Image (cartoon, rainbow, N blue to C red):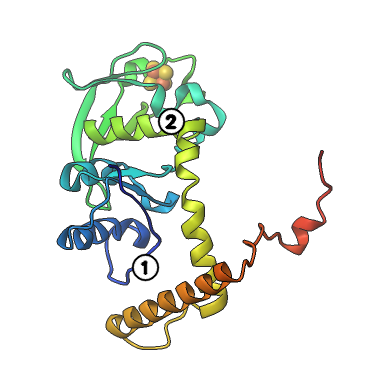
């Protein structure tokens, strides 16, 4: 039986990853220690990285379900044919082949600012210098095109996720996050969840437990008294928008 988990947690320790990215491993570690690991974990956009897609599966047998960020490069926006996803990667030979069919010249493994292993690829000056597509492929004045990609497992996981994350089937599964988003919203509006009234993680954690217990009682009361679920709320600005049929 598949067990799904939806979560939105905060963590205050400094990490080289962004704060939301950095909580994924501690969440899974904590769940593992309590034998509460789910088989699927629905996470928000800011939490899912290529590294997490691989490490969650390998270390905890947890499938992360959530969208990854789209490629932010200017090529993706203006000349998608020259985005890094359109370069073929030959992992065995350690070369990339560009959309014009040229093979890369150098391939070097490095560590990026976040401490993650990446691969820097560079094409040759002799090909890029005279390429008719140069202005659509690189903005470097004289240098050839360079690429930075994840290691093989992460690169593959990232590409696969980008391909499926807008399909109806994926969205149907991911829509189950709506439940936890509603819960967080209720916590923020009814219990001022965003602010801790105490100093220190231990007291803040206790505050969160009391809040959760209180919200459960509110929900039980609403359910017993037949209070209908709230509908989606829109800002005043949004309500001015003309309705389309
Ligand atoms: S600029 Fe270089 S990498 Fe880009 S398409 Fe031309 S030859 Fe290939």
Task: Looking at the picture, tell me which residue is in the foreground, 97 or 212.
Answer: 212
Instruction: From the top left corner, tell me how far across and down residue 222 is, in percent.
Output: 58, 71
Instruction: From the top left corner, tell me how far across and down residue 148 is, in percent.
Output: 31, 35
Instruction: Say left or right for 22 vs 208.
Output: left
The circle drawn on residue 10 is: 1
Crowd class of label 1 (few under 14; some 14 to 19; many from 20; radius 10 Å): few
Q: Is mark 2 within 8 Å of ligand 1?
A: no
Q: Are marks 1 and 2 in contact (CB under 8 Å)?
A: no
The answer to whether any part of residue 140 appears in the image is: no
Q: Which residue is located at x 40 percent, y 61 percent?
A: 8
Is disc 1 placed on a helix, strand or loop?
loop
Instruction: Say left or right for 91 vs 10.
Output: left
Q: Report the residue marked by disc 2.
A: 164
Q: How many marks?
A: 2
When asked about the image quadrant of residue 106, the answer is top left
Instruction: Say left or right for 154 vs 191.
Output: left
Q: CA distance from mark 1 to mark 2?
A: 28 Å
Vertical comparison of 40 with 31: above or below: above
């Amino acid at each position: 039986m598949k067990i799904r988990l939806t979560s939105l947690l905060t963590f205050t320790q400094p990490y080289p990853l962004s704060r939301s990215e950095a909580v994924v491993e501690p969440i899974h570690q904590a769940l593992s220690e309590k034998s509460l690991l789910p088989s699927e974990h629905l996470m928000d956009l800011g939490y899912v990285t290529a590294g997490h897609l691989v490490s969650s599966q390998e270390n905890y047998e947890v499938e992360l379900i959530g969208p990854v960020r789209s490629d932010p490069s200017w090529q993706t926006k203006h000349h998608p044919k020259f985005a890094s996803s359109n370069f073929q990667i030959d992992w065995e030979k350690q070369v990339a082949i560009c959309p014009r069919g040229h093979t890369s010249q150098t391939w070097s493994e490095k560590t990026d600012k976040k401490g993650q292993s990446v691969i820097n690829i560079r094409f040759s000056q002799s090909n890029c210098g005279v390429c008719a597509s140069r202005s659509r492929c690189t903005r470097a004045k004289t240098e050839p095109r360079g690429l930075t990609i994840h290691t093989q497992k992460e690169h593959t996981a990232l590409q696969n996720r980008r391909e499926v994350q807008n399909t109806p089937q994926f969205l149907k599964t991911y829509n189950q996050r709506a439940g936890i988003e509603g819960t967080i919203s209720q916590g923020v509006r009814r219990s001022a969840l965003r602010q801790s009234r105490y100093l220190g993680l231990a007291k803040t954690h206790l505050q969160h437990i009391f809040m959760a217990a209180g919200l459960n009682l509110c929900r039980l009361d609403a359910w017993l008294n037949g209070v209908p679920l709230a509908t989606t709320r829109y800002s005043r600005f949004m309500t001015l928008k003309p309705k389309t049929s």
